[in-house]
Amino acid sequence: MWFKNIQVFQFSADFSVKIDELQEKLTEFLFEPCKSIETYRHGWVMPATTSDQLFYTSSNRVLLCLRRQEKVIPAAVVNETLKERVQELEVKDHRKVGRKEKLSIKEDILSELTPRAFAKSSYTWGYVDLNSQLILVDAASSKKAEEFLDLLRQTLGSLPVLPLNTELTPVSQMTQWLQNTASRPAGLELDGQCELRSDLDEGSVIRCKQQELDADDVLSHLESGKQVTKLAINWQDRVQCILNEDLSIKRLRFGGDLLEEARDSYADEDPITRLDADFTLMSLELYRFIQALTEWLGGQRAAH
């Protein structure tokens, strides 16, 4: 359950959750498998497999899990079948099949294959942090995070959120941290990886990996006008990640001491005990990290 990527969202108005009503609301959007003619379905599932509760709370944070199931129809199969049917029609009717008709045939093929297709499931975890008034979603893409938020919005009836925004842009601060070691916040270290881009020279990208970022050949790119759009950082040896220009967090890893502390908390392997330890420790660490990150970037910008 430890998050690997994070999309962070802030509330645009004070938000609270009525815990005593939450189970009933989530049940209305309980996950059910795809029917034979459906291409996909999604809904809420239990965070702990041994409990029928569709959410888990710890320290005023509410954890949820979305399951998405979709039918897998290989594109190669569809294209091959389409090609065969188009050829048959052209031979039979002595005419060229147009684009619009091809699309119609393709839709028919998909309708025929869908009931026989295998179903594949994926899971998206996220939680509402009522302490910091943020939502954190374990998603590498904004599209996947939006699917989680959209279902939560349907479930609750309202969800006034927008992507986390700060007074200073991540690009300006990451560029400063790379350019000037004295500007780096206490406890923050650069982790040997970055991406540099230039607004003036469109398409010009420099990617550095496993490299000494304070080296002259890296810094020379900043002097020529490039800015940092991705930066690998290490915070107190407890959180390592790649910070992106849109404030999304990728390749998130937690320090060994924190993971060991979690393992020590659930020696009996009870799923609920394990979930409680993992979620409590992870969410607290992310609360501290996001608070620090927001401060480095001048504080959270108020939503309008």
Image (tube, helix red, strand yellow):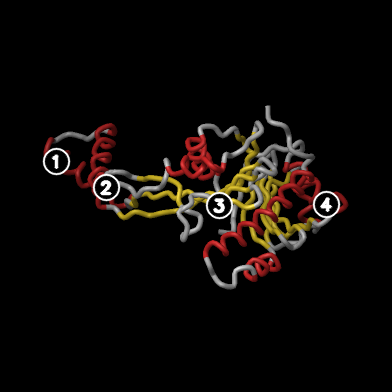
- Distance Cα–Cα, label 3 vs label 4: 37 Å
Residue 38 position within the rendered picture, expressed as x and y whole percent measured from the top left: 31, 44
Name the residue tied to disc 3.
Answer: 56
- Distance Cα–Cα, label 4 vs label 2: 56 Å
Q: Are marks 3 and 4 in contact (CB under 8 Å)?
A: no
SS at mark 4 in the image = loop
Camera-near label (1 vs 2) is: 2
Residue 141 position within the rendered picture, expressed as x and y whole percent measured from the top left: 55, 46
- Residue pictured at 69% horizontal, 59% vertical: 240
Residue 295 vs residue 91, the one in the foreground: 295
**In the displayed structure, would residue 143 be above or below residue 277?**
above
Left or right: residue 35 versus residue 13 is: left
Query: Which residue reaches farthest right?
Result: 182
Specify few, some or many for label 1: CA neighbours under 10 Å numbering under 14, 14-19, or 20 or more: few
Q: Earlier in the sequence, mark 3 or mark 1?
A: 3
Can you say which quadrant of the picture contains the N terminus? bottom right
- Distance Cα–Cα, label 1 vs label 2: 33 Å
- Residue pictured at 73% horizontal, 39% vertical: 169
Q: Are marks 3 and 1 in contact (CB under 8 Å)?
A: no
Q: Earlier in the sequence, mark 4 or mark 2?
A: 2
Per the rendering, the mark at residue 184 is: 4
Q: Earlier in the sequence, mark 3 or mark 4?
A: 3
